[in-house]
Image (cartoon, rainbow, N blue to C red):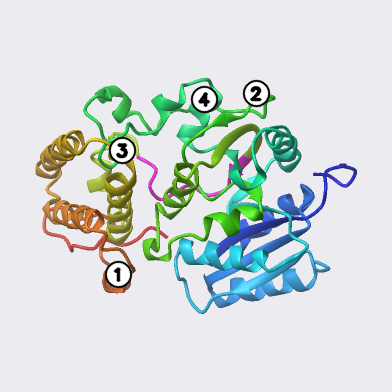
Amino acid sequence: MNANASNPRGVFAVTVTYGNRFALLERVIAATLANGVERMIVVDNGSVRESREKIETLAADSGGRVALVSLPANLGSAAGFKAGLEHVARRSECQFVWLLDDDNQPGEKALDTLFDQHGRLSQSIAQDQLSLASLRQSWDQHRKLAHGVAVHRVFPRHSSFMGFHLLIPPRVLAGVFHYDRPVRPSNEPAIQIPLAPYGGLFFDKRVISKLGYPNESFFLYNDDTEYTYRFTSRGGKLFLVPGSVLFDLDNSWHLVNEGETFVSHFLLADSDWRIYYATRNQSYVSRHFWARNFLVYSINKWAFFVLLSLYALRHRRWKRLVLIARAARQGELGELGRRPDLEALEQAQKHAGSPGRETRDQHFFASPET
């Protein structure tokens, strides 16, 4: 929403940052303010001192357009976005909320496009039942949808396990993260979807009072899946808006590398504690939200672990296999929450100079991606 736009004011953007990511965050803030948000809420989720001081200076020099919410440590993405949403929920001048990751740089008129689509859709859908999602340029699912692939072919089949289903062709699983056709902003109609990441979510503030906040027990990963699917499973309508494009400035840690498949990636990704949280939380979502037929779900889980075991035999990654099996079981049982013991062990091995990938008899916890 540029300076001359006629869209109503009252948009608060919320982003969560951590570590030493000010260089990315600064670009995101500049692009978001240029789109016309009234205020940018930055949740400092355990940034290093240098980054935190730069954020404080930027906020002080913004004329009130950037506000800082500080957490005592990195409490995870769910707690970070919850803190930001609690902040905007108390602000009477906030009418709409736009969630962004700290590396989501909005394209030109990304917010204008969201407003246009929200205005059209809210004529037939109550505003507290409506959410939109900007298109993430780096997300395989979003690119497929923008190029006309049917929704049911993009998102996991019901009763799949960890996104794996025996009815999905192996060639699709092998290339699920390699749909490289770029997407340009377009006037294509909004596409109804079942779930979305935090980054790009746009909704009327009244959605918060009806839906609540992210589940902090997830700590990291899939908390946005649970949050948005909680919304749609209760009758809410969520739409992807192809004309509102976000450009990811940083590569995600979990992108599959060349030569890896959907299944082998669980064994070959660098960080054990990241894989633990991702597996546990995705298993929870698969079992408690996505499973429609328990027999089909169980068969898919059995097939997934058979394939995973074969890859573990090939790559000699037995300890990672045990970690994944344990994490999946804990997810199914609903045993969520943070595991600081795993994170501390991996950090200790990082400082001790452990190799980045576990091979043969290397340490159980490999160094995390930095």
Q: Earlier in the sequence, mark 1 or mark 2?
A: 2
Say which mark, if any, is on residue 339: 1
Residue 222, magenta (yes or no): no
Foreground pick, 288 / 175: 288
Location of the C terminus by quadrant is bottom left
Please report the residue visible at 18 percent of the width from the left and 63 percent of the height from the top. Answer: 363
The crowd level at tag 1 (other Cα within 10 Å; few <14, some 14-19, many 20+) is: few
Residue position marked by numbered label 2 in the rendering: 188
Q: Is residue 243 above or below residue 316?
A: above
Span colored in magenta: 246-256
Q: Secondary structure at mark 3?
A: loop
Say which mark, if any, is on residue 163: 3
Side (left or right) of 279 relative to 194? left
Residue 341 x, y percent position in the rendering: 27, 74
- Residue type pointed to by label 4: Arg
Location of the N terminus by quadrant is top right
Residue 253 x, y percent position in the rendering: 41, 50
Q: Is residue 226 above or below residue 370?
A: above
Q: Quadrant location of residue 146?
A: top right
Side (left or right) of 317 relative to 201? left
Residue position marked by numbered label 4 in the rendering: 181
